[in-house]
Image (tube, rainbow, N blue to C red):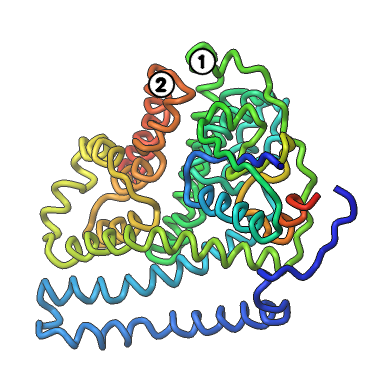
Amino acid sequence: MKTIKVYGPGCARCATTEAMVKEAAARLGVEVEVEKVTDARSIAMAGVMSTPGLSVDGKLVHAGGLPDAGKLDGWLKA
Amino acid sequence: MTTETHDPAPHRGAPDWLWYAGVPAVGVALYLLYGQLIPISEWVTALFPVARDSHTGEAIAFFAYDVPKVLLLLTGIVFVTGVLRSWFSPEKTRAILAGRNQIWGYPLASLLGVLTPFCSCSSVPLFIGFVSAGIPLGVTFSFLIAGPMVGPVGLGLLFGLVGWKIATIYLVFGFTIATLAGFILGRMGLERHLQDWVRELNAGPIGDLPEERLTLVDRLKTGAEQVREIVGKVWIWVLVGIGIGAAIHGYVPEAVMLRIMGGEAWWSVPAAVVVGVPMYTNAAGVIPIVEALLDKGAALGTTLAFMMSVIALSLPEMIILKQVLKLRLIAIFIAVVATGILATGFLFNFLL
């Protein structure tokens, strides 16, 4: 079980990122819990400056723009 | 994470060679199309059952010419900007600016404000990221003002629609206002007017991301992605802006324009700012209006002031910043930037 956090104030790309994570997890058969963090303060506290940001089990792996699909698979499988 | 197997993911899309060949090919095709816009727009205008030299005919011709022109220019500018900006990121910019308290931190921040990709939706995390990394408040403001004020879209369209001289004037003054306003705000010692939680925030752990290595094709893809996203979002503003521009071009008599926005009417500069601030559009929407105003004899200073206040001072942006700045600081921020804009407006009306 992995905990994925998607950081973003609710822009279109943040929603797309969330959908990408869910799709990839379902495809790879990885069990995930996806949480969206939309509060500016929490986003900043996580060290994210450009949104959407992505963390896996508490570790920030991506910030700014949509994540690369290939890399996303890698993070979920790791 | 162990070995990163870089399998050719299913989402890869077009092969690399197609990007190397396709981007120049599309570029040349759009350039050729751009050269044919006058005959095409005249042909379209002639389809309407109105006299070409009537008010309506003039307005239709303006619209038919400007819509494809602005959309083509916008596509080119956004693509090139997207590719160039792929070398920059807020994280890198923060590393460059952190601890730069010296005087040239301000112009540097203005420059990076233009080059760093960031969307206004993430200006709050960005603001906090900067301030918590020890970047002085004034330097952060220079960055935040320059981004929208001298954005490549506004400059590029100004260059294409109005001419290089005015585009250069705009660039120089926009950059100067961003730098000076940041400097002045920095000198005022406004840290106490940050929202309390921001001040209490101890430097949040800095997201330590491994730097992504991008290939040239990745960068071209970034550019294409930006075109899809930005042009897909702003085209409606472009149409509205050109519609207003067309109405001014076709129907507003020059005598009226001279009285309202001419160089003689000193009050027109502050009026332009007052009208401009609550107007929310982006550069792509306002430049066609600017084109029509100048064409009808509006004074350059007044028009510059209008354009700058529309682009650089927007209410939605202020509402976003309200999360981190107390009202008083927002008011000071607006006052300082507006003063710079007014000064620019008066200066050009006085000089010309």
Residue B293 lies in what quarter of the image?
bottom left
Q: Residue B219: x percent and y percent?
A: 68, 63
Residue B217 as seen in the image, left or right of residue B22: right
Q: Name the residue under label 1.
A: B190
Report crowding for label 2: few under 14, some 14 to 19, many 20 or more residues within 10 A (C-alpha).
some
Residue B328 lies in what quarter of the image?
top left
Q: Which of B63 and B58 is in front in this view?
A: B63
Query: Mark 2 vs mark 1: which is more N-terminal?
Result: 1
| Tags 2 and 1 on a common chain | yes
Q: What is the secondary structure assignment of the residue under circle 1?
A: loop
Q: Which of B270 and B246 is in front in this view?
A: B246
Residue B323 lies in what quarter of the image?
top left
Q: Residue B131: x percent and y percent?
A: 62, 25
Give, as a three-letter code, the residue at label 1.
Leu
Residue at mark 2 to residue at mark 1: CA–CA distance: 9 Å
Q: Residue B279: x percent and y percent?
A: 28, 43
Q: Going by the picture, which residue comes out furthest to the right?
A: B3
Residue B10 as seen in the image, left or right of residue B326: right
Q: Mark 2 points at which residue?
A: B332
Report crowding for label 1: few under 14, some 14 to 19, many 20 or more residues within 10 A (C-alpha).
some
Question: Is residue B57 positioned above or below B223 on the image?
Answer: below
**Chain designation of label 1:** B
Residue B14 as seen in the image, left or right of residue B289: right
Q: Residue at x 38, y 65 (%)?
A: B161
Q: What is the secondary structure assignment of the residue under circle 2?
A: helix
Give, as a three-letter code, the residue at label 2.
Ile
Q: Residue at x 33, y 54 (%)?
A: B286
Q: Residue at x 62, y 52 (%)?
A: A21
Q: Residue at x 19, y 74 (%)?
A: B60
Q: Which of B234 and A41 is in front in this view?
A: A41
Verify CB contact (< 8 Å) between mark 2 and mark 1.
yes
Q: What is the total number of numbered labels drawn onto the structure image?
A: 2
